[in-house]
Amino acid sequence: MESNAVSNTNWKEIGITAGIVLVVGFVATLGAIYAAKGIDKALAKKASSKENDSKKA
């Protein structure tokens, strides 16, 4: 039997690793979207409070 890279490849391990990478990437993307929305809300709130302060003056 000939020994080469294809016959020595553990496809199950590669599949598990690829699945983990995809899930982690998806979770990281959701986290980044959530953080960006939170930052946008904080900036909008800050701008709104500055606008209200200028109206009071």
Image: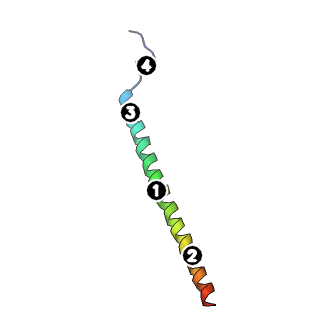
Residue 3's place in the image compared with 10, above or below, is: above
Q: Secondary structure at mark 2?
A: helix
> Dots 1 and 4: beta carbons under 8 Å?
no
Residue 56's place in the image compared with 7, above or below, is: below
User: Which residue sits at x=40%, y=18%?
Assistant: 7
Residue 13: x and y in percent read 38, 32
Residue 56: x and y in percent read 60, 90
Mark 1 to mark 4 CA distance (whole Å): 37 Å
Mark 3 to mark 4 CA distance (whole Å): 15 Å
Residue 33: x and y in percent read 48, 57
Looking at the rendered image, the disc whose residue lies closer to the viewer, 1 or 3, is: 1
| Residue 3 placement: quadrant | top left
User: Which residue sits at x=42%, y=36%?
Assistant: 18
Specify whether 9 is left or right of 36: left
Residue 38's place in the image compared with 33, above or below, is: below
Specify whether 41 is left or right of 55: left
Task: Residue under label 3, please give it.
Answer: 15
Residue 57: x and y in percent read 64, 90
| Residue 6 placement: quadrant | top left
Query: Mark 4: which amino acid?
Result: Val
Which labelled disc corresponds to residue 6? 4
Q: Earlier in the sequence, mark 1 or mark 3?
A: 3
Mark 1 to mark 3 CA distance (whole Å): 24 Å
Residue found farthest to the bottom = 57
Query: Mark 3: which amino acid?
Result: Gly
Q: Secondary structure at mark 4?
A: loop
> Dots 1 and 3: beta carbons under 8 Å?
no
User: Which residue sits at x=46%, y=60%?
Assistant: 34
Q: Secondary structure at mark 1?
A: helix
Q: Residues within 10 Å of mark 4 (few under 14, many from 20)?
A: few
